[in-house]
Amino acid sequence: MALHMNQIQNTYKVSSLTKVNATYFRLSFDAPALAKAVRPGQFIHIKVSEGFEPFFRRPFSVYRAKDGKVEIFFEPVGKGSRLLTSKKKGDSLDVLGPLGVPFAMPGKDVKQVVFVGGGIGVAPFMLFSDMLKKHAAEKVLLYGGRTRAHTFPMNEFKKNGVKVFTATDDGSVGVKGRVSELFNKVVLLPSTMIYTCGPRPMMAAVQTFVKEHGLVGQASCEEVMACGLGACLGCSIMTTKGYRTVCHDGPVFDLKELVFT
């Protein structure tokens, strides 16, 4: 049965909007209660305009939650996310969250944590690495993007003690190829835990890798979400247990449960 944190709907004030590079933006807003409640892998649902167009909220992974502020990391690919790029400090933001099932925190016996992220799929791993700073496990991030413009500066991850390896399709940053080209960068331990978020083909490759090495892993799925509460069924995906909604039953699932074919 899905476990959910207390859901909070409120209007918050934007504290900053910055352009990270040619592709990505970061938006931060003041939300002390939400920042305290959210867990890695959960998402928030934002009403991007004050009118009825677009009508539905847009889901965003929480990138960071500290000092009473919540931060998202996003790429403006559609009308809704493009509207967010016009937000200014002090603007109001209608937010529902935290929503969904979070990643399971690794136990004390886990000696290595490996994050595998593609593009904006890296977003939940910043909050995760913040919460794991005091965990003794080795922390590794395997990150992939299409080009240099689709890669994210990794200084914050490195400050959290995370070893970072990057791959790009065109070889403009790191290794040339998909994230799977980075799997050999990790010296696996028997107690390694794998967490992934990103495009389905990438997560399918991670699923195969986990199965081949007898590891335990979780995936945070990305789907278009309308209601965010499991009512409309628009974000349903196939699992070994039948169809499940990403917004309510997920977005985090055991890798073994996901069906990518």
Image (cartoon, rainbow, N blue to C red):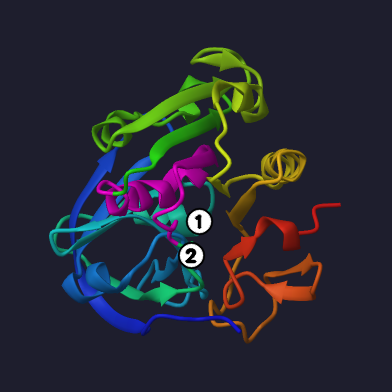
Q: Residues within 10 Å of mark 1 (few under 14, many from 20)?
A: few
Q: Is residue 1 above or below residue 253?
A: below
Q: Position of residue 215 (x, y in %)?
A: 65, 46
* Residue positioned 40% across, 37% down in the render: 139
The residue nearer to you, when weighing 213 against 164, is 213
Q: Left or right: 185 with respect to 141?
A: right
- Magenta highlight on residue 33: no
Q: Are discs 1 and 2 less than 8 Å apart at CB?
A: no
- Magenta highlight on residue 128: yes
The residue nearer to you, when weighing 209 against 83, is 209
* Residue positioned 65% across, 44% down in the render: 199
Q: Which mark is residue 79?
A: 1
In the image, the segment drawn in magenta is 105-134
Q: Which residue is mark 2?
A: 59
Quadrant of the image containing the N terminus: bottom right
The residue nearer to you, when weighing 89 against 228, is 228
Q: Amino acid at mark 2?
A: Pro
